[in-house]
Amino acid sequence: MKQEAGRQIPGIYELLEAAYGYQGWWPLLSKAGSPGYDDEGYLIGRDWRGAPTPSQRFEIVLGAILTQNTTWENAKRALIALRAHGLRGPKAILAENPSQLPTIIRSSGYHNQKAIKLRTVSEFLHSGNYLARRKAPDRERLLSVWGVGEETVDSILLYAFGMPFFVVDAYTRRLLARLGIADEHASYVWIQRLFENAMPPDAELLGEYHALIVRHAKTHCRKRPVCGGCPLRRRCPFPRDHSPES
């Protein structure tokens, strides 16, 4: 079944890319408005080479944790607050008063837990000097750090370190379920391998695919779908007439 389902994966990418264009993930607030980046920090044009500096790689790590179980807008507010307090690297996070950190990131939700996660991940990255060496951590070792699951780990490895791991999120599961490709409760590994076996092992390509799915899920494949104008409508057995409500 996986082989048959995998045949559809490249074609879906082509349709999404044609519909939405280049997404330029991961957004870097530190680069917003600078040459090659838009006002939100998304890359303009296809010149992705990964995050070039340790602080930018760490910014992606922070964002991957802060966006857990919340919107990007809430995570972004927390990122802005961290930058305003000068907390732009693992050493700075570890030196910050543990009782103050949750207050700084309050907008991200679950701020007490996320403050601990930021500290545990910072300790891991600092102890291995991963950011400065730009040496990607071993996936299993990173997964052993408290507070980071598969989706967060793969976001870090893909966007911060340029490792070709596909990120599986709730939007991906919803899309595949509606297209009849995979059960929404299929394992993370099963879905990840479905994409990685069907696409070239290219970090930019896999990151762009993930970003396009997020864009599509927010535009059309919502909890209450907006099927009118959906670029995947002809492939989807799910279409209904729905109002444009999320």
Image (cartoon, rainbow, N blue to C red):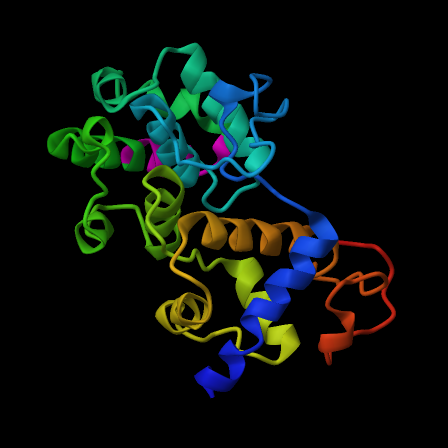
Instruction: State the image quarter where residue 243 is shown.
Output: bottom right
Farthest residue in the left direction? 127
The answer to which of 77 and 100 lies nearer the viewer is 77
Please name whichever residue, 80 or 209, is drawn nearer the observer in this view of the structure. Answer: 209
Give the vertical position of 189 relative to 109 (above or below): below
The x and y percentages for residue 79 are 46, 24
Residue 42: x and y in percent read: 57, 32
On whether residue 215 falls in the magenta region, the answer is: no
Look at the image and tell me in which quarter the C terminus lies.
bottom right
Q: Is residue 116 left or right of residue 22?
A: left
Across and down, in percent, residue 23 comes to 61, 42
Residue under the point 76% across and 63% down:
231
Q: Is residue 113 above or below residue 186?
A: above
174 or 213, which lies in front? 213
Start-end of magenta stretch: 108-116
Furthest residue toward bottom? 1
Residue in the picture at 83% in, 73% down: 240
Q: Nearer the viewer, residue 137 or 133?
A: 133
Circle count: 0
Q: What secondary structure predominates along the stretch shown in magenta?
A: helix
Question: Residue 63, located in which quarter of the rendered image?
Answer: top left
Eyeballing the image, is 163 above or below 39?
Answer: below
Query: Image point 19% across, 30% down: which residue?
Result: 133
Residue 109: in magenta span: yes
> Measured from the top left, where is residue 81 in percent x and y?
47, 17
Query: Which residue: 41% across, 54% down?
Result: 202
